[in-house]
Amino acid sequence: MYIVHSPTHQRHQPPYEIFNGEQTPHNEVPARADQIANALTAAGYGLEPVRLELDLAEIENVHDSNYLQFLKLTCEELKESEYRYPSVFRYRSGRESGNPLAQLGNYSFDMYTPLLHDTFEVASQSAACALQVAQTVLQAAQGGEVTAGYALCRPPGHHADFNQMGGYCYLNNAAIAADFLSAHGRVATLDVDFHHGNGTQHIFYESDRVFTASIHADPDWKFPFFSGYGDERGRGKGRGYNLNRPLQHGVTDDEYQQVLEEVLGHISSFRPEFLVVSLGVDTHESDPIGGFRLTTAYYTRMAKTIASMNLPGVIVQEGGYNTKLLGTNVVAFLDGFKH
């Protein structure tokens, strides 16, 4: 399996997150990607360093150009030891403001996702990993080969919206890969992270080019709270091209499998030519911020079920916060997918 990663991810080290008014240790740490890379190497997988330079002009279908420039310029202005969190958020009827404090709140939706000096460069490299895998999978498909690749992305991306960062995400890696592939055929995205992929949903919500599906914790129970409900089906041309399956606490392997098979049936009806999988293993029974009861062995079964669709696929790393088991769980998934 073709795997791409970026060693630069280690330069993005958020100092903390603010949850319920408390300053708490940040869950999205460099050890996540390092542990996955080490486990992949130990399992015999080869990792390629990212070589693609992300062209911002080519991702403006996915992210607003003003948002991209805000991220880039703000990070460049920060010193190596500085970081910046929002302190005020734009309210619904609020006007635009050029004040830097207001801009940060305008382009953020939580207090888990700070900006540091290297954040934009690292996020760009993370997105480039997904895009490089998508290009390779497309090239193989054009040569008549159905193959899959894995982008070891850090920071993750599926919460990043058209013009907002949040949920540890700055650029939507999966959406960037899906948008690229959609110029060459019908694309479906399948998000199996514990949390709803709100950014991916919103980016394609009015589009009939990409079918978006997400299996996740009920937003009445877990982040991101304001999206991920079952009645969100798309808008305009995108009506009927979005599917959510919110689940309750304690979902088991067999219960999840039943939902997965149902969702894949909907995806098959769309007749996609490419599949982008947002892989979060925070669905594992031991994840510190999850709440499902999926086992390591189940990730192999899950992957085999998805792979049975026999589509050219891009697997993009999202969440998973038990750093001791993170690599083991990712290896279990990729083992199932490649077979």
Image: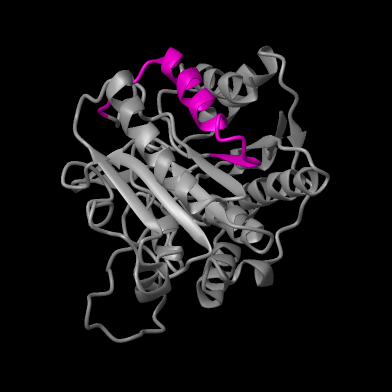
Q: Residue at x 58, y 70 (%)?
A: 73
Q: Is residue 256 visible?
A: yes
Whether residue 118 is visible to the viewer of this picture, yes or no, is: no
Residue 69, picture quadrant: bottom right
Relative placement, left or right, of 86 versus 207 is left
* Magenta-highlighted residues: 291-316
Residue 192 found in image quarter: top left
- Depth check, front residue: 78 or 306: 306
78 sits left or right of 194 in the view:
right
Q: Is 307 covered by the magenta stretch?
A: yes
Between 108 and 136, the residue placed more toward the observer is: 136
In x, y percent, where is residue 230? 24, 51
Taking depth in this image into account, of 49 and 232 the one nearest to the observer is: 232
Residue 203, placed above or below residue 92: above
Give percent across and percent down for residue 304. 53, 23
Residue at image coords 38%, 49%: 167
**189, above or below 33, in the image:** below
Residue 136 in the image, given as x and y percentages of width and height: 76, 45
Q: Residue furthest left?
A: 220
- Residue 184 image point, x, y percent: 69, 60
Q: Residue at x 17, y 41 (%)?
A: 221
Left or right: 244, with 80 as reference point: left
Quadrant the C terminus occupies:
top right
Residue 289 located left or right of residue 130 = left
Q: Is residue 29 above or below residue 107?
A: above
